[in-house]
Amino acid sequence: MDGFRLCLALGPLAVYLVLLAWMNLSRRPFVVSGARDLAALGVAVSGMVLVGPIELLLPEQAIYVYKGYVWLLLGVMYALCVSLAALLARPRLTIYNFTVDQLRPLLAEVIDELDSEARWAGACLALPKLRVELHLDASPALKNVSLVATGDDQSFAGWRRLEGALAMRLRQAESPANAWGVVLAIGSFLLGACVGWQVLVHPQAVTAGFREMLRL
């Protein structure tokens, strides 16, 4: 793999790891919807997908005919596929840098405000007024908790209300930094260093790879 393709494959992933490291090392929890989480992951792996299966299966004639515009079309197509996957996925909320024991009392306060008919059944929760049914999925090693939809009959408006109320509550909460963030920070630094090395030490190779990819 030439320098340009290496930068393209690792660059977005390095930025994604920086974002995850920042959220995990922060002393405040962060709530992220499943759609935004999936979209961010799609952007993170976009470079690898582009220089991997997309370039491998792309007809050579298409590049010669459409030049650089073919990559714009492929980028739009990839973005549409990621958007479709995010829309078809079941609703989910992920709280980073927070444990399930920390979340339960805070979530109980939010539920009391939103739905007086809420019912708990172990780790499952039903909010009839919001038309939301979910279960708690904890990842102690990564120190995050996910609220995952348990059925297909869900109200996206109800999930949005739950996300907004939960985000407001989490602004007042604090949590110790997650040690997992150090691993993510090291990983992002190594990837960033690899990209920076290629750009600074082999700028001509990166430029040549870019021109060769676009057939300029």
Image (tube, helix red, strand yellow):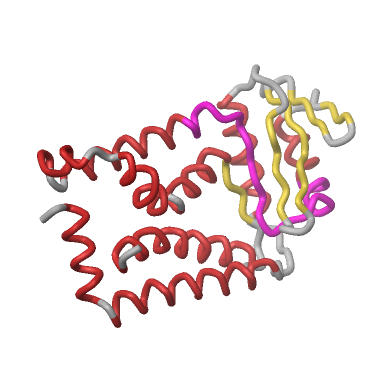
Q: Is residue 13 above or below residue 113?
A: below
Quadrant where the N terminus is found in the figure: bottom left
Q: Residue at x 68, y 66 (%)?
A: 180
Query: In the image, 65: left or right of 195?
Result: left
> Percent position (x, y) of residue 111?
75, 35
154 or 51: nearer the viewer: 51
Residues in magenta, as a range: 85-106
Query: In the image, 70: left or right of 8?
Result: left
Report how many numbered discs are placed on residues in the image: 0
Q: Is residue 131 above or below residue 148?
A: above
Please identify the residue farthest to the top as the structure is shown: 153
Q: Residue at x 72, y 58 (%)?
A: 142
> Percent position (x, y) of residue 139?
76, 51
Please identify the residue farthest to the right as the structure is shown: 122
Query: In the image, 104: left or right of 17?
Result: right
> Percent position (x, y) of residue 110?
73, 40
Q: Is residue 149 above or below residue 35?
A: above
63 or 46: nearer the viewer: 63
